[in-house]
Image: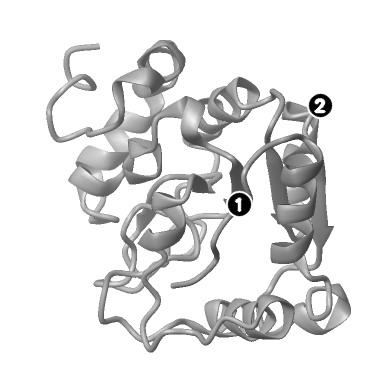
Amino acid sequence: MGVVLTPEFDYHESWAPVLEPALEAAWPSIGPVLERDDFLPPREDIFRAFRIPMDAVRVLIVGQDPYPTPGNAMGMSFSTRPGVKPPRSLVNIYKELRDDVGVTPPRDGDLTAWSDQGVMLLNRVLTVRSGDAGSHRRIGWEVVTEAAMRALNRPQMVAILWGRDAQKCKRFIPDVPTIESSHPSPLAARYSFFGSRPFSRANAFLRDQGAAPVNWQL
């Protein structure tokens, strides 16, 4: 485990009991790939989604894997680094955000303000080979993110699951209310994403459970 527990892998200490056993199990397959590949996001940002204290998470939004374009990925699903133009899926998320709760979208794709509100933006797979979408699936990250989601199967939570890959994770959080639709990608958004009102519905689920709603302003 020494190679894993280094300062560059930065996550909140509350996640350690969940992440460390999962990483110990998965690292024999993950480690060699990261040593071989030019990967994204940068090593220090791989666990950025886990910088929220575990008991502060109110909303879980599950993505697939990081943006493969250099300079975009920053360790949280759908989010880009500050100043980066929103990719097309995020443009559609912003459109639904405006239509649902009246938030005027920012010019960039940085969703850190949501993370600060207790929204965990978790990719199912935490790294990707630069320029090669989906290239780090099935190398072991799924073990880690499954453990994380199972730890969030508790009251005062809601999950937003866009697309089939995310919806397959529902089995890890059987006690959590879920909001499901098609993925916000340009190819899928028109099926059931637009008009699904995920942001207002998430707040309604939180209020029903006695939890504070999220301020979705960016």
Rendered location of residue 166, percent (x, y): 70, 50
Tell me: 145 left or right of 185.
left
Q: Is residue 86 visible?
A: yes
* Depth check, front residue: 111 or 192: 111
* Label annotation for residue 175: 2
Which residue is tagged 1? Answer: 61
Q: Quadrant of residue 216?
A: bottom right
Label 2: few (<14), some or many (≥20) within 10 Å?
some
- Residue 52 in picture, x, y percent from top left: 39, 37
Seen in the image, is 147 located left or right of residue 189?
left
Q: Residue at x 68, y 74 (%)?
A: 184
Task: Name above or below for residue 34 compared with residue 75.
Answer: above
Point out the residue furthest to the right here. 191
Which is more toward the observer, 45 or 108?
Answer: 108
Marker disc for residue 168: none
Q: Is residue 140 visible?
A: no
Q: Amino acid at mark 1?
A: Ile
Q: Earlier in the sequence, mark 2 or mark 1?
A: 1
